[in-house]
Amino acid sequence: MSAANWPACIAFTLGEEGGLVDAPGDPGGLTNFGISQAAYPALDIGGLTRAGAEAIYRGDYWGAVRGDELASGVDLMVFDMAVNAGVARSAEILQRCLGVEADGVIGEAVTIPAARAADAGRLVAALGAAQLAFYESLRGWNEFGRGWGGRVGRRLARAKAMIATTTEA
């Protein structure tokens, strides 16, 4: 599958998340590398390093969505959505796109086999549409929608490029 994709996926996500930000209206509050004070209240967000952020993303997000077991491109779609909207939400969207029970946990018995059996190109397209629909349903869409929608578009384009590279190899 895509264990080798971690560097490409984290590079994409960190490129989208940026550095230290305290945006008015953002429920996460102070963030650095996309890591929010709300999610990690005991962490010194201002002092967070890139290596520290990568360690959090690797353990709490990539591991939770089982990125190493997802196909190239699918891994990026699921991981980056988990970072931006939560692990359970991203897992539920993946599960709905696969037509399996959407319990918010990517497990070995149901979700992983369904993901392995799916056509990666079709799955990333379905994920892109479902992720955009999720953002459009949020009450913050008017304020943050342009950014969310743009990120989904860039995520989808990068995922498709990852698939193309994998099928060429």
Image: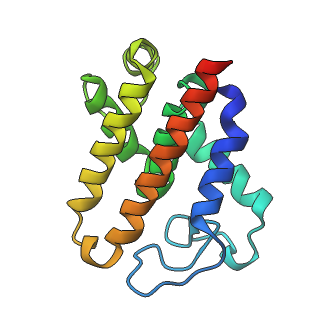
Position of residue 94 measured from the top left corner of the image (x, y, whole percent): 35, 34
The correct choice, above or below, for 40 with respect to 92 in the image is below
- Looking at the image, residue 131 sits to the left or right of residue 166; the answer is left
Residue 58 visible in rendering: yes
Residue 64 visible, this orientation: no
Depicted 48 relative to depicted 65: above or below: below
In the image, 121: left or right of 54? left
Q: Quadrant of the C terminus?
A: top right
Report the front residue among 164 and 9: 164
Asked if 50 appears above or below 2 in the picture, the reply is below
Res. 31 image quadrant: bottom right
Left or right side of 40 for 106: left
160 or 34, which is in the foreground? 160
- Expressed as whole percent of the image width and height from the top left, the position of residue 133 reads 24, 52
Could you tell me residue 1's position as x and y percent? 61, 19
Task: Spot the residue most to the bottom.
Answer: 24
Q: Position of residue 12 (x, y in %)?
A: 62, 52
- Say which residue appears at 29% left-offset and 44% top-offset: 129
